[in-house]
Amino acid sequence: MAQAKLIDGKAFAADLRAKIAEEVAELKAKHGVTPGLAVVLVGEDPASQVYVRNKGEQTQAAGMYSETHRLAAETTQDELLAVVDKLNADPKIHGVLVQFPVPAHINQMDVVAALSPDKDVDGLTVTNAGRLASGLPALTPCTPLGCMMLLKDTLGDLSGKNAVVIGRSNLMGKPMAQMLLAADCTVTIAHSRSKDLPGIVRQADIVVAAVGRAEMVKADWVKPGATVIDVGITRYPARDPAAAAVGKTRLVGDVAFDEVSEVAGAITPVPGGVGPMTIACLLANTLTAAKRLAGIA
Ligand code: NAP
């Protein structure tokens, strides 16, 4: 059987980062504006530490100003909100991202509500979610934005396609569905209460899986030739016992990659598909926020 085209998010993200770096250099030279991103991490979640380090490194590599605020796990909500307020008011900073999850004693929605919508580079505030839903210019969540770029690059015009998004989180499923709708797809959102999920997914020309259940989407769920975007990440110990013994992990997506590759027209791998797009889109959003805040078209 034919093998699906591999959608290379790693290469796409590298190109995008290079284009962003060029634009940043131009913005500095022409307008004296250096886009600045502040990332706030509360606690010591190991995966979050890796994400935050990568974000800081890639922000600097793009020529932007980067600040990382590492706060102790016992930081109170008021202390965290005070840091957010300060960053909202800091003219060097154009994007503020609080790395989630935060410890259980902090209310995530309160943190999101404290972010200035103009600096909300994760697109999580009610203002940006509402603007996206209303078709107005918005800062939109980075991962679905990256998925849209990969889909448009793979398929061109998405108009009229049947798209099924599995997952309905504010960070991923809901904004993904809004973006597909804005691109004139016919959109279905499936979730844990959906009945006959395989039957729903079989209708799709485009499947976006954002659940967090390893290899849930099987080959017989997928319409031949469909484009499959795998957002899910589940961490397992590395296959090599020596590597696993020192805490090394491997990432598994929501899609049973080997079997689905035999049916789909195009598919993202995990890792190397959607993952690299998320940080590249964070940089893109920071650049957009910096231009808007500086009043540059
Ligand atoms: P989340 O908030 O936990 O949402 C998961 C969604 O999956 C929920 O809407 C849930 O439905 C749905 N779901 C759970 N079990 C299901 C089932 N058996 N059948 C159908 N739907 C089911 O997670 P998230 O933040 O959206 O992230 C989803 C996945 O993407 C995670 O693995 C995460 O690590 C990954 N992710 C990756 C990136 C990246 O950069 N690659 C970025 C963000 C997230 P209910 O609403 O009914 O509970």
Image (spheres, grey):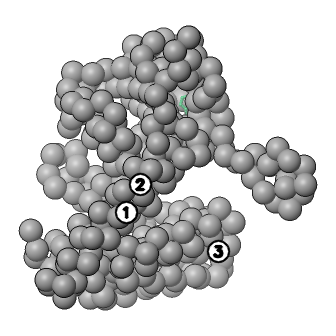
Q: CA distance from mark 2 to mark 3?
A: 29 Å
Q: CA distance from mark 1 to mark 2?
A: 6 Å
| Residue nearest the viewer, comparing 109 with 86 | 86
Q: Assign the N terminus to one quadrant of the image.
A: top right
- The tag earlier along the polypeptide, 3 or 1, is 1
Q: Assign the C terminus to one quadrant of the image.
A: bottom left
Q: Local crowd at mark 3 within 10 Å, few (<14), some, or many (≥20)?
A: some
Q: Is residue 245 above or below residue 151?
A: below
Q: Which residue does the numbered mark 3 point to in the structure image?
A: 43
Q: Amino acid at mark 2?
A: Ala
Q: Quadrant of residue 133?
A: top left
Q: Amino acid at mark 3?
A: Gly
Q: Residue at x 26, y 88 (%)?
A: 91
* Label 2, ligand 1: CB separation under 8 Å: no
Left or right of residue 243: residue 15? left
Residue 296 drawn at (x, y percent): 10, 74
